[in-house]
Image: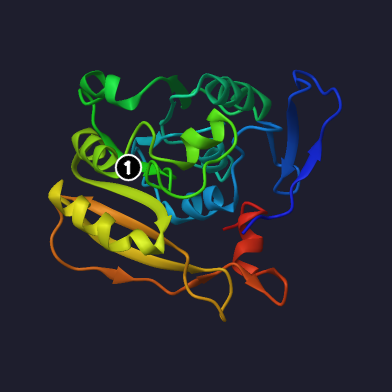
Amino acid sequence: MHNKIDSLEHTHGNLCSSETLDILCEEKLKFFQKKDGYRFSIDAFLIANFVALKRGERLLDIGTGCGIIPIYLAKRGYTNHMLGIEIQDDLFHLAMKNKALNNVSDHIQFLKGDIRNHVSKLKKEPFNVIVSNPPYTKKNSGRISPGDSRYIARYESFLDLSELLSTTASLLNKKGRFCVIYPSKRLGELIYTAGLNKLELKRLRLVYPKKSEEANLFLAEFLKEGGIGVKIEEPLYIYENGCNTEEVKKYYTLKG
């Protein structure tokens, strides 16, 4: 589930030898990424296009990586205040470089650190929307990823699902929304754990690699202290006849 990304590995401005410069969305987006560390995938575009922000709403991106989700949303025309927090030094510095590279204004900010250490400060002004593309795999399960950067991004080594949801609930205002992309096999676990934190499922969209295959991901929106009632949205298919579907193609032109 990866869209083709053009990578320029020669010297380009602040491009280091350990980085690539990835050109996306008809050259409207440019991102520095590590050659060998964690790199974002199509999942970031799926969740960014699932999020809907209203005027004046404040957004928090937990585990922002190189800043892909806030910067992408800004390029789609959102002028909302957005804060991305990242625990890994190298990814945080990439987010800052990417902010400058894409010339997005100061309504996009990045914060380095463990979200749990910033809760007391951030909860003084709760967020309307929190988004996350969190690690998909439980700690000590599955195949170990090479390198710390990839391991931290893919495994619940620092923030497990329970901690993510409890932290999210504490940082959302009443009726605030939490949007997430997650593996379909963990849907029941996510709904149950979210409920323990007074986060009620309101929107659900299953993601299929293609129509002939089972769903492997889902997009979900939870409402803090929301009532019963879920909207099941139409399926999202990534590939058709070996190419991205028309909907996914729009994501890569910033028209999603």
Q: Is residue 246 visible?
A: yes
Left or right relative to 137: residue 203: left
Please state which of residues 221 and 250 is positioned toward the viewer in this rendering: 221
Label 1 is placed on what type of residue? Val
Q: Position of residue 56 (x, y in %)?
A: 34, 37
Identify the residue shown where x is 24% and y is 58%.
191
Q: Name the colouring of the figure.
A: rainbow
Left or right relative to 15: residue 149: left
Q: Position of residue 223 (x, y in %)?
A: 22, 52
Quarter of image, res 59: top left
Left or right relative to 102: residue 208: left
Please state which of residues 26 and 121 is positioned toward the viewer in this rendering: 121
Identify the residue shown where x is 41% and y is 48%.
141
Residue behind mark 1: 129
Give the answer, above or below, for where 9 lies relative to 180: above
Quarter of image, res 128: top left
Element type at mark 1: strand
Screen quadrant of the N terminus: bottom right
Screen quadrant of the C terminus: bottom right
